[in-house]
Image (cartoon, rainbow, N blue to C red):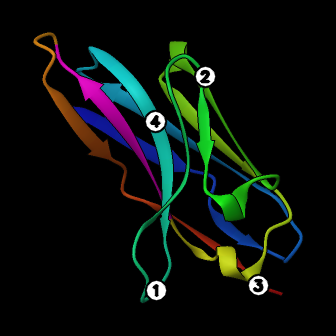
């Protein structure tokens, strides 16, 4: 079992910045991609950004240039630096991890989510 714990959410004014962290722990064998998703009230969960173990990144178009995903493989931790935040960025942000066990069986783990509220 792998646990993901997010931190760094909170209330920020429009134009401000936040840095989210997500640390994986537990019985980790191999993690490939890690990513951030978000879900606003009444909307579907959507991809924010993802990063492979080799550092290849993918961003949703609306986040490009404002958000930066990074990763520390040694710490099994993924980060999301969010700049120029807008009220539309208000959502619960979730991290996930594509884990493979020693038999190559994949499983996607999710964190519990952290609230980000952008408001004046």
Q: CA distance from mark 3 to mark 2?
A: 32 Å
N-terminal-most mark, 4 or 3? 4
How far apart are the alpha carbons under marks 4 and 3? 28 Å
| Secondary structure mainly formed by the magenta segment | strand
- Secondary structure beneath label 4: strand
Q: Which mark is residue 41?
A: 1
State the residue at coordinates (51%, 50%). Answer: 36
Q: Residue at x 82, y 52 (%)?
A: 65
In the displayed structure image, the side of residue 73 where residue 112 appears, left or right: left
Q: Earlier in the sequence, mark 4 or mark 1?
A: 4
Within the magenta stretch, is there residue 37?
no
Residue 118 is left or right of residue 7, and the answer is right
Judge the density around disc 3: few (<14), some (14-19), many (≥20) Cα neighbours within 10 Å: some
Q: Secondary structure at mark 1?
A: loop
Residue 96 position within the rendered picture, expressed as x and y whole percent measured from the top left: 39, 44
Marker disc for residue 119 = 3
**Dot 4 surroundings within 10 Å: few (below 14), some, or many (20 or more)?**
many
Camera-side residue of 31 and 1: 31
Q: Which residue is mark 2?
A: 55
User: Which is more foreground, mark 1 or mark 3?
Assistant: 1
Residue at image coords 55%, 16% = 54
Q: Which residues are magenta?
A: 93-101
The quadrant of the image that shows the C terminus is bottom right
Do tag 4 and tag 3 residues touch (Cβ < 8 Å)? no
Mark nearer the viewer, 1 or 2:
2
Q: Is residue 100 on the magenta stretch? A: yes
Q: Residue at x 36, y 57 (%)?
A: 112
């Amino acid at each position: 079992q792998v646990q993901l714990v997010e931190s760094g959410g909170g209330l920020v004014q429009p134009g401000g910045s936040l840095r989210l962290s997500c640390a994986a722990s537990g019985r980790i064998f191999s993690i490939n991609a890690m990513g951030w998703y978000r879900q606003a009230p009444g909307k579907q969960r959507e991809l924010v950004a993802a990063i492979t173990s080799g550092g290849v990144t993918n961003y949703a178009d609306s986040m490009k240039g404002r958000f930066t995903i990074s990763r520390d493989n040694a710490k099994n931790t993924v980060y999301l630096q969010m700049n120029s935040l807008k009220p539309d960025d208000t959502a619960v942000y979730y991290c996930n991890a594509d884990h493979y066990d020693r038999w190559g069986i994949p499983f996607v783990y999710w964190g519990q989510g952290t609230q980000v509220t952008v408001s004046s």
